[in-house]
Image: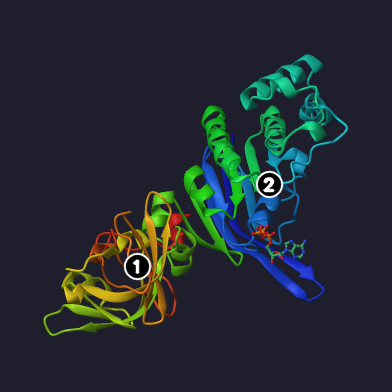
Amino acid sequence: MARVEFNDVTKVFEDSSGPIVAVEELSLDIPDGEFVVFVGPSGCGKSTTLRMLAGLETITDGEIKLDGTRVNELSPRDRDIAMVFQSYALYPHKTVRQNMAYGLNLSTDLQEEEIDRRVVEAAEMMGIEDLLDKKPGSLSGGQQQRVATGRAIVREPSVFLFDEPLSNLDAQLRKHMRTELARIHTELGITTIYVTHDQEEAMTMADRIVILDNGRLQQVGTPKDVYYRPANAFVADFIGSPSMNFFDVSLDVAGDGTGTLVGDGFEYAVSTELVDTIDAGTGEYILAIRPENLRVDEDAPAEKSFEATVDVVEVIGSDNFLYLDLAGQECRVRTPVEIEPEIGDTVRITFDEADLHLFDRDTEEAVVHGHNRAEEAPQTIEQQV
Ligand code: ATP
């Protein structure tokens, strides 16, 4: 087991069209035994980061350490890391047993009995003992995924890397495997880095989530941190489904110190307490609020609510999602099932001041978080890593 450190790691690819910065000055400290999920949109640098750690890609600048030792120059086989890919990469002509044993046969001097003992143990852990003498071609996608994971477990590595391992499975199996992988991590306690573009996977599996965009670190935190205290508008938008509502607003401050957030089609009164936390700001913000924090309430006070027109009502069973038109902007509201307005209805929407987030309009960095206003300022990237 190992601690993993990225210190100012940069990767630049040289392409015919010029240099491509895939990862830029990434610094991250992952303690021994942690389950960390890298998440971000396509092309944000997740796989490149993983491949640099595995030794499959050179590092342009910076340093990667495993348990305090620099590994930049070490070959992949000397890093004691096992990686599971989206494609599974199983040998079609070898049996499951041979596939699982292959890496150990190549890279260690272990006796055959010891190798077989480890293979059987890993197969039991993955629930594939019955498949040991079959070939990959006769297995389902889920079974192949188990074999690929079992092959990684057999190696008893210091670090596990998973690159979108569940992408080829159907939704139900993905959910099931998610729980299985989390169980295996708890059982083995091996430091695990898991890459996905699926924010739900990240939220449900991670001890900490690392959010990347465009090769740059956006935020590192527990699932609750990134959900309740997104460091910037990108994270706020990326995490949560349906995604947060964003409205451009200006802050008007009255003589008594109270304020009003003025947006297109609405005004919302805020307390002196909130104004005091942001009075050094520019006055121009993005107001962000999660769909579940908006409520339909015809009796809400006018200065704390706005009217919008119902465009779409989605019934999902446990809740309803309303898609509203607020002066030409889409506003998403998650409501209890009893609230099912007609298309074209005008509804009054309100929310608690404690649930709103404000982001600086220029930098898109967080200025105010719903649940932690004055006491806890938004974390900077430096504080998180
Ligand atoms: P995805 O989810 O689509 O796999 P990702 O977040 O894993 O995306 P990377 O594959 O790490 O992203 O790619 C990051 C950037 O580096 C992208 O702009 C990609 O086009 C570029 N890139 C990756 N590999 C190479 C390469 N071998 N040569 C040139 N550019 C590359």
**Residue 273 as seen in the image, left or right of residue 243:** left
Q: Residue furthest top?
A: 113
Find residue 278 and report its image quarter.
bottom left
Residue drawn where x is 26% and y is 75% of the image: 306
Graded by Cα atoms within 10 Å as few (under 14), some (14 to 19) or many (20 or more), the crowding at tag 1 reads few
Q: Which residue is mark 1?
A: 342
Image location of residue 266, percent across then percent down:
28, 80
Q: Is residue 38 above or below residue 278?
A: above
- Asked whether residue 222 appears in the rendered view, the answer is no
**Position in image of residue 102 (x %, y %):** 81, 29
Q: Residue at x 60, y 39 (%)?
A: 173
Q: Position of residue 134 (x, y in %)?
A: 80, 25
Mark earlier in primary sequence (2, 1): 2
Q: Secondary structure at mark 1?
A: loop
Question: What's the colour scheme?
Answer: rainbow
Q: Quadrant of residue 192?
A: top right
Category of crowding for the residue at label 2, using alpha-carbon neighbours closer than 10 angstroms: few (below 14), some (14–19), many (at least 20) = some
Residue type at mark 2: give it: Asn
Residue 99 vs 358, above or below: the answer is above
Determine whether the beta carbon of the residue marked 1 sits less than 8 angstroms from the nearest atom of ligand 1.
no
Q: Measure the C-alpha gap from mark 2 to mark 1.
A: 39 Å
Residue 168 got which mark?
A: 2
Residue drawn 26% across and 66% down? 351
Please tell me whether mark 2 sits on a helix, a strand or a loop.
Answer: loop
What amino acid type is highlighted by mark number 1?
Answer: Glu
Lateral position of residue 36 relative to residue 98, left or right: left
**Residue 245, image x and y in percent?**
39, 69
